Image (spheres, rainbow, N blue to C red):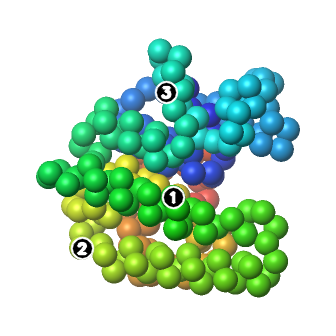
Amino acid sequence: MKLYYVTGACSLADRIALAEAGIACDFIRVDLHTRTTQDGASFDAVNAKGYVPVLVLDSGEMITENIAILSWIAEQSPGLRPEGPLGWFRLLEATAYISTEIHGGFKPFFHSGSPDEKARAAAEVSKRLGYLAESMTSDFLLGPNLSVADAYLFVMLTWARRNELQIPPRLEAFYQRMISRETVRTALAQEGLEALAA
């Protein structure tokens, strides 16, 4: 199995989730500027969409899009999704919200947005993080146990910190809980991001 990733990108959530699930995987770094993989292959030949993450299963089948990959991981490791009759749907609800409302909100920071665009984006992302903070009633986003949605939220918080956005205290405490996990610290080290654990 292979995961194509970019350092510090949303693919970091998949790396963390795979580690939490105990699923062995090879990780292939992608340079989106040169459109090549670390071994010099064309990334566009791997994924015509042109972005990470991409998970290639041992069968050769490919899964793209973070929500789909995280869902596949949760399917392999049911402990990484909430229990109960609506557990699966709560997971989809959370990952979709993170993807569309928070992840997408960072676009001006990564695509040379103007100062005004970045200010508006910062306000919107902070507001949406506030919603998640208010909705949390336990240590993790969907209850007392970690789910794949927490891995995705953690990466969004690394982006928020990098761009000096306001993080609600409850989510800052969540960030510290995530940092204390060996899987998270190892994933950060594997991508050369040890400073995020400081």
Which is closer to the viewer, label 2 or label 3? 2
First-in-chain label (1 vs 2): 1
Residue 117 location (% of width, % of height): 74, 79
- The quadrant holding residue 118 is bottom right
Q: Residue reaching furthest left?
A: 84
Residue occupied by mark 1: 99
Q: Is residue 132 above or below residue 13?
A: below
Count of marks placed on residues: 3
Q: Secondary structure at mark 3?
A: loop
Q: Residue at x 48, y 76 (%)?
A: 128
Q: Secondary structure at mark 1?
A: helix
**Res 112 label:** none
Circle 3 packing at 10 Å, graded few (<14), some (14-19), many (20+), is some
Query: Which is nearer the eye, 164 or 81?
Result: 81
**Res 25 label:** 3
Circle 1 packing at 10 Å, graded few (<14), some (14-19), many (20+), is some
First-in-chain label (2 vs 3): 3
Q: Is residue 5 above or below residue 38?
A: below
Residue occupied by mark 2: 137
First-in-chain label (1 vs 3): 3
Tell me the distance, in whole angstroms, between the alpha carbons under discs 2 and 3: 33 Å
Residue 165 lies left or right of residue 168; in this view the side is right
Q: Residue reaching furthest top?
A: 59
Residue 48 location (% of width, % of height): 71, 33
Q: Amino acid at mark 2?
A: Thr
